[in-house]
Image (spheres, helix red, strand yellow):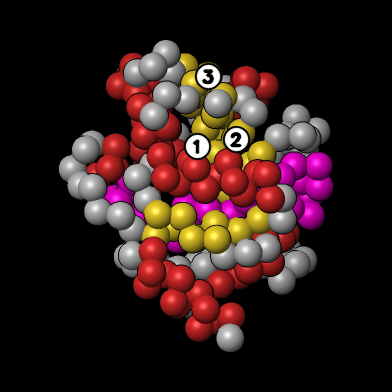
Amino acid sequence: MKIGIIGSGNIGGSLGRLWAKAGHEVFFSSRHPEKLDSLARQAGNGAQAGTTDEAIAFADLIFEAVPFSATMTLPVDALAGKILITASNYYPKRDGDIEINAPSQSEALAKKLSSTAVVKAFNMMFAEEMEARANGETEEKLAIFYAGDNAEAKAVVAQLIEEAQFSPVDAGSLSNGIYFQNEAPLYAQRWSQAEAQQALDKVEA
Ligand SMILES: NC(=O)c1ccc[n+]([C@@H]2O[C@H](COP(=O)([O-])OP(=O)(O)OC[C@H]3O[C@@H](n4cnc5c(N)ncnc54)[C@H](OP(=O)(O)O)[C@@H]3O)[C@@H](O)[C@H]2O)c1
């Protein structure tokens, strides 16, 4: 699959490496693409680097891990018809005042990107865990929640979670992203798949 990474930092850099290793065509992007050459070389499997617009044009699936303020300015038309995994979290101190205008961060984004299949995932996991897997330092299977309203897109994302060496746990519709956005009960947890499912059942009860 052709994957475009927007924000090739702690999270995007490690996941891009894992997905390239799993055989995907990865295109890293940033506002400073000239700084991404070594990351692309390290990722291997022909990974490329360029601008955000180039990554979006290249890919069928976009993974974003930038500050939430930048997420909310992603180009609506260019992303139409694609899958977008959103991993960003909203921190007013960092991101400034943003009118969320929806019950959850992911729904606010999906409202804006109305022709894109938005799936929330990876935002609840520590960057260090992704880096450890990209570096081959651990094989521990930790759970990652994912939520979205498009079943086909969710199946693709579940597979990508597996390929990043985590265990996918389906949290249901995008509105359930509220359970694992920052400061919510399912956020920042190192759980097995069974523990995560149990915690999800409890929060939904
Ligand atoms: N770190 C964690 O443990 C963790 C865990 C879960 C979720 N998150 C969330 O995931 C997102 C990324 O976190 P991260 O730790 O990977 O951050 P990071 O290492 O700082 O990477 C973010 C990337 O976004 C780009 N960026 C920064 N400001 C931008 C802007 N205003 N517009 C466009 N691009 C911008 C930067 O690249 P250029 O400057 O080269 O463009 C940077 O490499 C954040 O929303 C964070 O809250 C982080």
Q: Nearer the viewer, mark 2 or mark 1?
A: 2
The foreground one among 163 and 32 is 163
List x then y, in percent, for residue 144.
44, 57
Is residue 183 positioned above or below 160 on the image?
below
List x then y, in percent, for residue 61.
61, 33
Q: Are marks 3 and 2 in contact (CB under 8 Å)?
A: no
Left/right of residue 80 with respect to residue 7 in the rendered view:
right
The kind of residue tagged 2 is Ile
* Element at label 1: loop
Residue appearing at x 52%, y 67% in the figure? 180
Is residue 84 positioned above or below 55 on the image?
below
User: Number of marks in the image?
Assistant: 3
Q: CA distance from mark 2 to mark 1?
A: 11 Å
Label 1 belongs to which residue?
A: 7
Residue 17: quadrant of the picture: top left
List x then y, in percent, for residue 15.
40, 38
Q: Nearer the viewer, mark 3 or mark 2?
A: 2
The foreground one among 112 and 33 is 112
**Image disc number at residue 62:** 2
Residue appearing at x 78%, y 35% in the figure? 80
The verdict on label 1 being within 8 Å of ligand 1 is yes
Which residues fall within the magenta stretch? 110-130
Label 3 belongs to which residue?
A: 50
List x then y, in percent, for residue 112.
78, 50
Residue appearing at x 20%, y 47% in the figure? 138
